[in-house]
Image (spheres, helix red, strand yellow):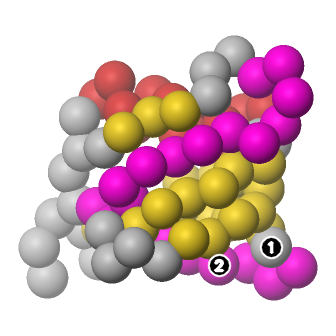
Amino acid sequence: MSECRIACDLHDYIEIACLYGYLLRLTLKDTRTVEGRALNIVTEEKREFLLLDNSEIEKIALDQLAKLQVITPNARFTDVIF
């Protein structure tokens, strides 16, 4: 399985979203949109995943992210393009 690698500065945005528990709207590379609260980043089989709480816990591979939008008001950032 290939390793998931994203730029460190982009990874930092995801970590901040988890730290503050931001509500996110994620656009994936396959154009699917997912919303939920950022919980944590986990590593499994050399790949990193964002744990997202959207009434159940969903794992989103970081290498599948195309865009991250913060829905939480007054957040420290709003949009990140991957």
Distance from disc 1 to disc 2, alpha carbons, whole Å, reads 7 Å
Residue 12 position in % (x across, y down): 46, 28
Contact (Cβ within 8 Å) of mark 1 with mark 2? yes
Q: Nearer the viewer, residue 9 or 42?
A: 9
The range drawn in magenta is 55-75
Considering every residue shown, the one lying at the far left of the view is 2
The one of 7 and 79 positioned closer to us in this rendering: 79
Q: Is 65 placed above or below 74 here?
A: below
Which class describes the residues within 10 Å of circle 1: few (<14), some (14-19), or many (20+)?
some
Indicate which disc residue 54 carries: 1
The residue closer to the viewer here, 40 or 13, is 13
Along the horizontal axis of the image, is 73 left or right of 64? right
* Image coords of residue 65 (percent x, y): 38, 59
**What amino acid is labelled 2 in the image?**
Glu
Question: Looking at numbered disc 1 in the image, what kind of residue is underneath it?
Answer: Asn
Q: Quadrant of the N terminus?
A: bottom left
- Quadrant assignment, res 53: bottom right
Mark 2 packing: few (<14 Cα in 10 Å), some, or many (20+)? some
Q: Position of residue 77 (x, y in %)?
A: 62, 21
Q: Residue at x 43, y 49 (%)?
A: 67
> Residue 58 bears which disc, if any?
2
Instruction: Indicate which disc residue 16 carries.
Output: none
**Left or right: 75 with respect to 5?**
right
> Residue 17 appears at what percent x and percent y?
66, 37
Q: Which residue ends up furthest to the front in the rendered image?
A: 31
The local secondary structure at tag 1 comes to: loop
Please, is residue 14 above or below residue 38 in the view? Answer: above
The correct choice, above or below, for 7 with respect to 30 in the image is: above
- Tell me if I can see residue 65 in this picture: yes
